[in-house]
Amino acid sequence: MTVAPPSQSQRTGSDAWSDTKLLYALEEVVERELNRHLKAAKEWMPHEYVPWSDGRNFDGIMGGEAWSPEQSKVSDIGRIALVVNLLTEDNLPSYHHEIATLFGRDGAWGTWVHRWTAEEGRHAIAMRDYLLTTRAVDPVELERFRMQHMSEGFESDNAHSMLHTVAYVAFQELATRVSHRNTGHESGDPACDRMLARIATDENLHMVFYRGIGGAALDLTPNQMMRALTDVVLNFQMPGLTQSNFRRNAVLLAKNGIYDPRQHLDGVLRPVLRTWNVFGRTDLSDDGARARDELHSYLEDLEIKARRFEEQRDRALARAAVARAV
């Protein structure tokens, strides 16, 4: 199947593509990206990344030792980041429901949906086994957090359009990769760093898949996709937003370099937008052009906020260093 070029009315946005038409028109691209992904993806086993010899029974029906903070090998910030990241991965059933509903379960789209879900499922398996085996976190608290978070479910603000969803996951997968890698570095445990590096590799491959679909959508219906990606960038939230204390933890993690405004701007938004040649396109008009102007203004504002955040963090670190020296 060959995708027909957009007509003039589609370029100007006066005849927006429906989700059904877009899914059909992009099927060939999805198949190509899926085949590329399957060639690039390497099989890996979650159990190989867990230091099982560190494990022992907890208190309770097994009569083991109760958890206490000093048993953890990871830093305090690393522990918070690990819990945030794991709880985010735990909500996979909700994420699968969303993309399966939007993309369908048939053809190349359906094959991707199930493959993506299977790969993502390994992340929570490996992370939870590591955390419990190494006693990195309180197991009772972790399970209660999981129950609370998953009981609330998850509904993305971008689920009303497949283009919004494609744009969102392209950015979100890369953001998750950045968060996992920085969490591994912060943890202070080489085993944790190795495990999260392996998970981050998956996230990067997922980003590449969605980035390819997003680029094809921009070529197919540039104004419509530009509006969608601008909406997503201006209202971007990580999927863990519904977690208890997520906003407070997000600020704490930003202050400690796990995921901050600079990383979001330079490590996530700009690389994807650059690959899509968003600011070099000549096929935009009307709402598409307005959306790009909005995006440009937002990125300029975010640059200012990122600089301000870095300056404030540097001052705080300097004050803390002086206090320790006294």
Image (cartoon, rainbow, N blue to C red):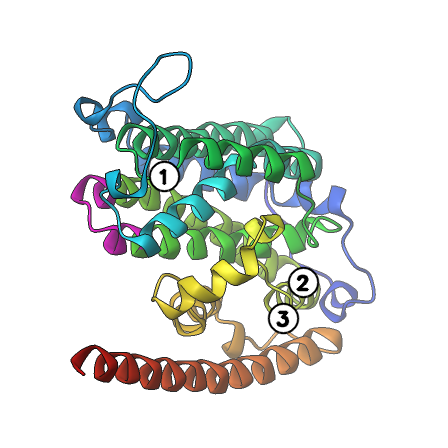
57 or 10: nearer the eye? 57
Tell me, yes or no, whether the highlighted magenta stretch contains residue 130.
no
The amino acid pointed to by label 3 is: Leu
**Residue beneath disc 3:** 234
- The CA span between labels 3 and 1 is 34 Å
Give the percent coordinates (x, y) of residue 107.
Answer: 60, 28
Q: Point out which mark residue 137 bears.
A: 1
Span colored in magenta: 183-194
Residue at position x 34%, y 66% in the image: 257
Kindly indicate whether the residue at mark 3 contacts the one at mark 2 (C-beta within 8 angstroms). no
The amino acid pointed to by label 2 is: Ala
117 or 255: nearer the eye? 255
**Residue beneath disc 2:** 228
**Who comes first in sequence, dot 2 or dot 3?**
2
Give the percent coordinates (x, y) of residue 3.
Answer: 62, 48
Give the percent coordinates (x, y) of residue 174.
Answer: 43, 55
Which is closer to the viewer, label 2 or label 3? Answer: 3
Residue at position x 60%, y 56% in the image: 217
